Image: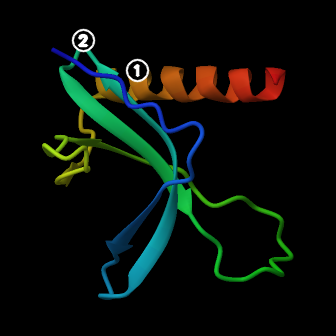
Amino acid sequence: MAHEHNHEDEERYITLVNDNGDEELFEILLTFDSDEFERSYVLFYPVSSSEDEEDGEDGEVHAYAYIPTEDGGFGELMPIESDEEWDMVEEVFNTFLDDEEDQ
């Protein structure tokens, strides 16, 4: 039985350790469940540490599958490996962006 994660009204953050052993803060953009793949997914992007970025580029959005913990946490993040999963995640992300633009 799948359950919905709806975090639209609350800001959520996740901290990950990068390859250099440094902690990085990410803001969670979207979480959703897929009945087709029977997995949960999280999309997040880095929180900029510099307020005066001049290049104007947004941080790259990262997407991972995860198995929710009993208390609603993310558990272990797992890479998305199949093209079919990436296509589905991309479609959900594009729909999310379209919905955001319409508001």
Going from N to C along the chain, the mark reached first, 2 or 1, is 2
Element type at marker 2? loop
Q: In terms of image quadrants, where is residue 21?
A: bottom left
Q: How is the image coloured?
A: rainbow
Of 55 and 78, the residue lying toward us: 78
Residue at 73%, 29% (x, y): give it.
Answer: 100
Q: Nearer the observer, disc 2 or disc 1? A: 2
Which x, y percent locates residue 28?
Answer: 49, 51
Query: Which residue in the protein does label 1 denote?
Result: 88
The amino acid sitting under disc 1 is Met
Tell me if mark 1 has few (under 14), some (14-19) or many (20+) residues whose alpha carbon lies within 10 angstroms of its own: some
Element type at marker 1? helix
Of 82 and 45, the residue lying toward us: 45
Side of 102 relative to 96 (left or right): right
In the rendered view of the protein, which quadrant contains the C terminus?
Answer: top right
Q: Which mark is residue 36?
A: 2
Which x, y percent locates residue 93?
Answer: 55, 29
Side of 17 relative to 77 (left or right): right
Residue at 32%, 24% (x, y): give it.
Answer: 33
Up/down of 103 relative to 12, above or below = above
Up/down of 34 relative to 79, above or below = above
Residue at 18%, 52% (x, y): give it.
Answer: 75
Spatial CA distance of label 2 from label 1 is 9 Å
The amino acid sitting under disc 2 is Glu
Residue at 42%, 28% (x, y): give it.
Answer: 89
Which x, y percent locates residue 87?
Answer: 42, 23
Which x, y percent locates residue 14?
Answer: 40, 63
Tell me if mark 2 has few (under 14), some (14-19) or many (20+) residues whose alpha carbon lies within 10 angstroms of its own: few
Q: Are marks 2 and 1 in contact (CB under 8 Å)?
A: yes
Q: Which mark is residue 73?
A: none
In the rendered view of the protein, which quadrant contains the N terminus?
Answer: top left
